[in-house]
């Protein structure tokens, strides 16, 4: 049924200017040869806001968050007394991902580190999928369990990615990529999928961890890690008929910021952040216990305590409306949840600031899950400004030490696809392209507006079938 096999390689946070700077320094020579050899290349515009979880979910579904229901790292619902917040998991996703789509045509898939795939058993893929859940999962798990070694590889230096500083972080991330590549290649020896979807989070982590990388100063420190990804690409190049390279957003340095929380607080609005993680002290203790767990004699107890603390991070938390008239989930000021009844007030205050673009949820998202979306979204008119949740003396501030953060433009590269007028792609365009490369029909309700889709009329109502199977409790990897 499947005409071609496809490997989708995700490079989290990669933008063209960074990739070209790496190529210029002789890094990733094999990938460079693919890009230069006449592959199709485009800029990929991220979701609004450009954030990892919704962007990857849109890339993997072909629809906007209003249909797939993933808006940020957190799932926020509005209770009677306050906002309820928890980390997004596969249970929150309301639209089939690419491995679930191809599973309906009995295509085999291998999915590694795609956000919101935990618990892996919950993915509806007709036992044709091997799924290893992502770094955000309460525990990284493989389905089927025989692929546990790959899950272990994905745990390599996971805790240290938030604590390690340069140059150490580069060494750790290099070891991590090597371990994941090695175990993935092992899996490919015995399991030949029609579709592989792997996300390398490490580029995003080093760019968050070291602004000097984006300045070009520390790029040499990252060359081994990027070359390890390049070696992996080289290894699998002949295994699959086609390759797709995609990032969920880009990265940039910021010297100026706009304090969204100050705008609201000055007008008497109780605006606060709430994350899924516990305060810093709790995180430090968790990491300490993980570290102690390396010593054999105290390992059992230390591990139990660390796991308990780690899991607690993901339990549901409640933010009462009496203290939270505005909630920024995960300290992200671009998403604004508003206490019921105050929406117009908040929108009007924010709209007075010329440097901001302000949207109501229904202006950005379309679909049955919009009622679950943040009430208001903001982005800077000019992406040289970073939006901040910390309260500042002034609303617009100079950031003393440059900060690296996401920006909206990522990359897209593929072999075997031609398209005129497709220089700028949306996240929603990836699924139709991958399915087209595989020779499978396009989802009838995709949000992709690519013109070439008009010439490829074979469509299929994947989501209707998926919802039916889910309601019957069928198709799960395991129950
Ligand atoms: Zn990302």
Image: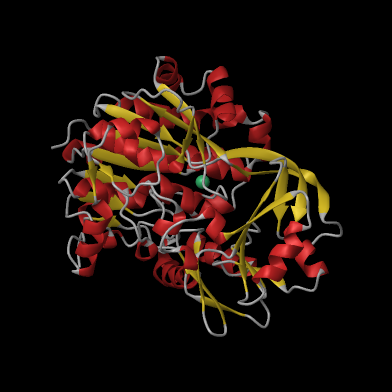
Furthest residue to the left? 1
- Residue 162 pos. (x, y %): 57, 53
Q: Nearer the viewer, residue 146 or 285?
A: 146
Give the quarter of the figure containing the C terminus.
bottom left
Identify the residue at horizontal 37%, vertical 60% (top origin).
Answer: 93
65 left or right of 399?
left
**Colouring chosen for the image of the structure:** secondary structure
33 left or right of 46?
left
Q: Nearer the viewer, residue 366 or 206?
A: 366
Vertical relation: 180 (above or below) 51: above
97 left or right of 261?
left
Vertical relation: 290 (above or below) 107: below
- Residue 210 pos. (x, y %): 64, 41
Furthest residue to the right? 393
Inspect this view and state whether residue 136 appears. no
Vertical relation: 294 (above or below) 190: below
Q: How many marks?
A: 0
Furthest residue to the top? 37
Identify the residue at horizontal 42%, vertical 48% (top origin).
Answer: 58
- Residue 272 pos. (x, y %): 68, 70
Q: Nearer the viewer, residue 362 or 238?
A: 362
- Residue 304 pos. (x, y %): 41, 71
Q: Nearer the viewer, residue 450 or 287?
A: 450
Give the quarter of the figure containing the N terminus.
top left
Inspect this view and state whether residue 26 appears. yes
Identify the residue at horizontal 39%, vertical 53% (top origin).
Answer: 134
Identify the residue at horizontal 52%, vertical 18% (top origin).
Answer: 26
396 left or right of 303?
right
Q: Within the image, what quadrant is residue 472 found in?
A: bottom left
Q: Within the image, what quadrant is residue 89 found in?
A: bottom left
């Amino acid at each position: 049924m499947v005409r071609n096999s496809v490997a989708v390689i995700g490079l989290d946070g990669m933008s063209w200017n960074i990739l070209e700077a790496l190529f210029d320094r002789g890094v990733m020579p094999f990938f460079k040869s693919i890009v230069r050899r006449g592959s199709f290349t485009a800029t990929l515009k991220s979701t609004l806001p450009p954030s990892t979880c919704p962007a990857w979910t849109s890339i993997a579904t072909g629809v906007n968050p209003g249909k797939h229901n993933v808006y940020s790292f957190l799932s926020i619902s509005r209770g009677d007394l306050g906002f309820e917040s928890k980390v997004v998991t596969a249970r929150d996703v309301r639209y089939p991902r690419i491995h679930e789509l191809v599973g309906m045509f009995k295509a085999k898939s291998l999915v590694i580190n795609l956000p919101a795939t935990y618990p892996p058993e919950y993915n509806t893929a007709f036992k044709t999928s091997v799924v290893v859940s992502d770094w955000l999962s309460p525990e990284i798990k493989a389905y089927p369990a025989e692929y546990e070694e790959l899950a272990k590889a994905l745990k390599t230096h996971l805790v240290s990615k938030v604590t390690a500083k340069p140059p150490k972080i580069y060494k750790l991330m290099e070891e991590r990529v090597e371990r994941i590549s090695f175990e993935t290649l092992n899996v490919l020896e015995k399991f030949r999928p029609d579709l592989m979807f792997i996300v390398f989070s490490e580029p995003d982590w080093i760019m968050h961890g070291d602004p000097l990388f984006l300045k070009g100063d520390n790029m040499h420190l990252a060359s081994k890690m990027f070359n390890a990804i390049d070696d992996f690409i080289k290894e699998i190049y002949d295994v699959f008929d086609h390759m797709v390279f995609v990032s969920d957003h880009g990265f940039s340095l910021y010297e100026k910021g706009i304090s969204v929380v100050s705008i609201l607080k000055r007008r008497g609005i109780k605006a606060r952040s709430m994350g899924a993680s516990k305060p810093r002290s709790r995180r430090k203790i968790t990491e300490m216990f993980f570290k102690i767990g390396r010593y054999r004699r105290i390992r059992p107890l230390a591990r139990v305590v660390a796991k308990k603390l780690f899991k607690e991070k993901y339990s549901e938390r409640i933010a009462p409306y009496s203290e939270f008239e505005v909630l920024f989930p995960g300290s992200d000021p671009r998403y604004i949840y508003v206490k019921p009844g105050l929406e117009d007030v908040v929108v009007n205050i924010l709209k007075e600031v010329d440097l901001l673009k302000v949207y109501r949820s229904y202006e950005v998202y379309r679909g049955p899950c919009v009622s679950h979306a943040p009430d208001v979204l903001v982005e800077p008119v000019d992406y040289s400004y970073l939006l901040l949740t910390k309260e500042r003396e002034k609303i617009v501030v100079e950031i003393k030490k440059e900060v690296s953060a996401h920006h909206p433009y990522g990359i897209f590269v593929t072999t075997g696809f031609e398209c005129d007028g497709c220089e700028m792609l949306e996240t929603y365009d990836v699924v139709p392209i991958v399915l087209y490369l595989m020779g499978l029909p396009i989802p009838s309700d995709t949000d992709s507006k690519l013109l070439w889709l008009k010439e490829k009329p074979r469509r299929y109502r994947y989501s209707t079938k998926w919802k039916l199977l889910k309601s019957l409790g069928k198709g799960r990897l395991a129950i």
